[in-house]
Amino acid sequence: MPNNYIPVFDPASAHTEAISHLFITVLVVCAVILLIVIGMVAIGLLRFRQRPGSVDPPPHFGNRQLELLWTIGPTLIVIWLFILTARGMRESDPIPPPNLEPDLVIIGHQFWWEVRYPKAGVITANEIHLPTGTKWLVRMESADVIHDFWMPELARKIQLIPGQTNHLWLDAKKPGRFLGNCVEYCGVEHAWMLAVVVMESPEDFAAWLRGQQKPAPSPAMDSTRNGLQVFTAQTCVNCHAIRGVSTPAAGAAPDLTHVADRSILGAGALANSATNLFRWLKNPQAIKPGCLMPNLKLTDAQAGALTEYLEDLQ
Amino acid sequence: MSATVSTTSAMATPEAEEKSRGLYGWVATVDHKRIGILYLLTTLFFFMVGGVEALLMRIQLARPNNNFISPDAFGQLFTMHGTTMIFLVVMPTLIGLANYLVPLMIGARDMAFPRLNAFGYWMLPFGGLLLHYSLLTGGAPAVGWFSYAPLSETAYASTSGTDYWGLALLVIGIGSVAASINLIATILTLRAPGLTIRRLPLFVWMVFINSFLVILALPFLNAAIVMLFIDRHLGAHFFMPSHGGSAVLWQHFFWAFGHPEVYIMVLPAFGIISEIVPVFARRPIFGYEFVAGSTVAIALLSFGVWAHHMFAVGLGHPIDMFFSATSLLIAVPTGIKVFAWSATLWGGSIRLTTAMLFAMAFLIQFTIGGLSGVTFAVVPIDWQVTGTYYLVAHFHYVLFGGTFFAVFAAVYYWFPKMSGRMLSEKLGQLNFWTAVIGFNTTFFVQHFLGLMGMPRRVYTYADLPGWGWLNLISTLGAFLLGFSVLLLLCNIIISLRRGRPAGDNPWQAWTLEWAATSPPPEQNFDCVPPINSRRPLWDLAHPENPDPIVGGPQSIDGFVLEKNRVGMVTFLVSESCFFLMLILAWLFYNSRAMTGPSPASTLDAHKTGLFTLCLLASSLTIWLAERQLRAGRPGWFRGLLGLTILLGAVFIVGQGREYFRLYHQGIVVSSNLFTTTFFTLTGFHGLHVCVGLVLLLILLGLSLAGDFKQGRLEAVKSIGLYWHFVDIVWIVVFSVIYLKLLL
Amino acid sequence: MTTSHFLISAWSWNPWVIAFCAAALFMGFARFRPQTAWLLLGTAVFFLTLCSPVNALANGYLFSAHMLQHLLLLLIVPLLILLGLSGGAVPQGFENGRWRWANRILRRPVAAWLMGVGGMWLWHAPTLCNAAVSNVWVHRLQTASLLVMGLAFWWPIIGPWTRQRLVPLAGMIYLFTACLGCTILGIIITFSPVEVCSIYLHPMDRLGILPLIQGNWGLTPAKDQQLGGLLMWVPACLIYFFGILGLLVRWYREPGQEAVGCAAARPPLMEKSYGL
């Protein structure tokens, strides 16, 4: 769960802090202008109500100086806002130097986020871990339609457009768990395309990354071995990668090598727990209708075994 | 008490009476007043439909993890709600009001082209029918009202809903452009004597400027939809990045239409408010020239701000900054208007009728929406709030709290003129308060939801703190708002039968429509009062204290225009915009390297050059034909006209053979982006030539049948203009494609 | 080299420019009127365009600087010069004397429009654009032609004697269509991957400022072309936009023309529609 009520005004990085301050400044300006207008209207309505028996007042057609004032005044305000805008853009979205290798690659799919750490050789999905105190360059791509990645506390939003790459800086000053959404309608399950970013201390992050780099643990018990059998016998292997077990075409479905580590399932449709995973495996279409995982019509036993195996993949 | 001048007598011939009675009279009407009312009734119906769609969505969103409506149905609902409200409600309502009021306000008998007017209206129910027919053929469109590619391509939107969306918009767009051409021609050529352009009522002026926006912006949408259709049905890849197309180009093309569109939806509302506030404050508008001038500024700037809808696309900081500058600048003329309306109240004698109440609510609500719009122009803020409920709140504040409240005000203000009866003030006050409370309850909280992270177009959401109860409040507000609309409906129905008779000028207003009876007779006026200022009825009622004469006595505008010419030129300007988009698409795609057929390998510039010469010669022959007709030599006229048709036909045959040759080599529309853009651009040009040939054949036929009356010369000149236009477009197309100019 | 160092040192002293400015200043001060302030401003801008660091940047480094020069030479300097000359008496010989031919050309708005918009398009043809940077005579031709075309373009709008100006409504259409013309060009330059002026892709670093430009300022050739296209488009259109607003103000201030007889007034009742 997020730590705060209004994420846009609870920035966790220097970039979103710049935006938040700018936003508050602009809101104050807007509030003042609104109050002036409300004042003009309300006071006008009260003072100049029609009194009984009154005739039409003598016509008055305007006041050139006043009109110039409310032309030039707002123009100056607008020019000032533009200067703030230019500065705010530089502060909140520094342009990455050309040809810099990204530290993180996010590929948008209908309806999940593929997450790759190219320098560490790690592939995961929907949940991103990053160390605090350093800026990471993220490259954004899309495998199908236009998506939009948004972590309100951490960074500006940016579209993931097929055929184009975009870049984003992600960093945080303090550890925390942050929730974000896809913000560009990408199809029927756009609502459940959540992402989680976990900002942790560099040591915790290094430990996590090391864990992710290992291949999937082999099943130790009978129940989990049964689960692995279900995984390979049913068509799961055709889409889902588990390092050490299956390597299907890239990006067909979320990588499940360390799925038990994640806090959400189905890109936010469910919290990650054994009960929820069982429900999902029994019928993903009942939970997230229109997602691209078909209902494999597993029996309770098969689903149970598979759940045990997958929940073992730390 | 000012004496209203009733300058009309409701006399009509018995035959006319008979024809205009009953349903047939309404269906076959070309009278602008009836057409205006038809528009309003149709849009009222679609408003209900769109409103129900909204309420269904709000029920689904009232609590987290709700399953009242399936995600697929929700996708269709928000797409249909947006499309319906924009194209079937707001735009046509404003056009309908303009249709009814403009001829009355300028002292004309009807619009310049009454039959075109009727045609434009019938495109509306036809388009609405097309859009909703999709429900029977596999589902309504579910890709959002702006239908971003590649989501709208067949790979991701396989039902025909998207196709019906495109078709409906093309049809409705044709109707809108027809109405706008009509309005421009009417306002330029049919004003009563003394009504110079500088004396125009602000509603007419704003409708006039708005009509230019319509004719220039809608072709951008038409071009984009046409290209989407070619992708969807002919296998092309304009917007498919996987085959070299560009998804971002759709966004550019769409928003180049989309942004002027939102001003199209608001400028006539500004006009409504500019009429109503002065009348109920009993003062002329504060600063007419600044208000009129700021309208021009908004219209010009509105074409230069579209990429502020694309700040999240990653176009690069320089581009973002430029569009931010223009978007911030466009706030200034809008602000000028708001201050002018507010200042009009001061020193007045204000009557808070229902119409005035709605106008005051407009002022505040539109300002709120406009200011939240300014926050979007500040790019980093946009980077946080675009695509969220903050954006939904913004556009509902300007479009509903703004435009639609202005429409409500217009209903209460002009209903007496249209029906002869007053709407109930008591019901009106109830209508107003439920509307204001309902509207603000629904949409104000949505600003917070956006700031809290709620994206738009989601069918449900997680149970995050505050999201549930804020959404619930919004839903309750929506139902109150729906109730207020029902109240308006009741008010209209009851008042049609039992409303107090209105008389000619119940509000003691000052523009010309109030000089006619309520409702006006078919010919509107028997004679028009003298016009020397912007408030002719004030001058009539206050001969001891008339308004200052605007522009000097016996003033005329420095030009005299002929309406067929104006209509045709306006139409051609609109078509140029369409071709401009296709040419830009050509330049965009052909400036990149690509595999497959190329201009060098497939095109034969010399042969096409020969056919080009034929087409250019045909321009010469039709010009000569016009001169012969004017000199009174019909034989020569027919001969030259026939020659023109022949030359045009040679061109078409030549092009057809070129297409045939390419087809035989296996080079089709879908081969690569060169062939796609080539066939699209030359194909649409060829279509325009064919239409021109049909027009010329009709002229030839009429001439041979001896049916050439005096006024036909104007028709010939207009069609001649069209033909020259087609030639000029070909010169540009030929240079760009065959001579590789600009590449 | 730092930015401030560059701004201080990169001035050039072009003798032609200085001579021209001196002549303009002399003419201005010889018959000093309030409008002369515009003329002085125009001269100053002309000087800055061709002698300041902007010129150094345009000389082979930055396409956008080159665009800025175009903009100033075609739109701003002529505008200021004409404003400076406004209200003056018609020079002898212009109407009926030896300079009749010049008057006949300047009087036609279509020709003036074509020169103004055409000039912009012409100098963006890749061959011509490259030639202007590499060959000094073509460059001088470009500068001179831009000034002349700019003067011709603004003549129907703010030409010195009002009788030859377009009526405000026609002037607004004139400027609006010019805005369209430069918008299309600006869009093409900003968004197309074509290198309009390929000579800027590989600048010769005569002044040693390439690291400053591409490093500190972040202006890679791609960004530079984008910026150039945007400069061509947005500021130019804003100039036309404010021109249109200026014409609107002029129009509303006009006392209005007198009706010539009653033939112009058409009673609406006698309208019959033959057309659509």
Image (spheres, coloured by chain):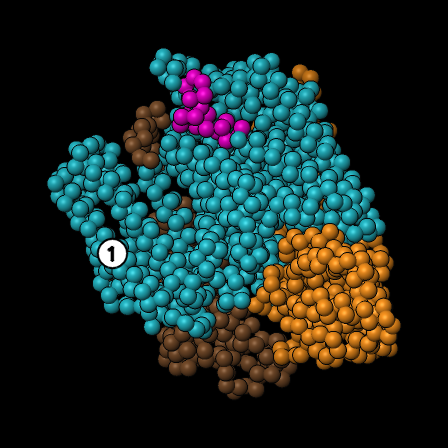
Colour chain B appears in: cyan
- Which residue is more in the foreground, B731 or B202? B731
Which sits in the foreground, C19 or B321? B321
Which region shows up in magenta? B20-41
Q: Residue at x 54, y 67 (%)?
A: B242
Q: Which chain is brown?
A: C
The residue that mark 1 highlights is B653
Q: Judge whether B679 appears above or below B628 on screen.
A: below
- The residue positioned 45% from the left and 61% from the top of the image is B236
Image position, residue B42 (x, y; %): 53, 31
- The answer to whether residue B647 is visible is yes
Name the spot of residue B38 as percent of width and height, x first.
49, 28
Q: Who's the residue at 47% across and 45% down the image?
A: B167
Mark 1: give few (<14), some (14-19) or many (20+) Cα within 10 Å.
Answer: few
Q: Nearest the camera: B619 or B166? A: B166
Write down which chain is painted orange. Answer: A
Image check: C231 left or right of B71?
Answer: left
Q: Is residue A132 left or right of residue B412?
A: right
Residue C15: x %, y % from top left: 43, 80
Image quarter hosting the N terminus of chain B = top right
> Which residue is at a point 49% across and 34% down the rendered structure image?
B125
- SS at badge 1: helix
- Determine which quarter of the picture holds residue B308: bottom right
- Quadrant position of the C terminus of chain B in the picture: bottom left
Residue B387 visible here: no
Q: Is B149 in the magenta?
A: no
| Kind of residue at badge 1 | Val
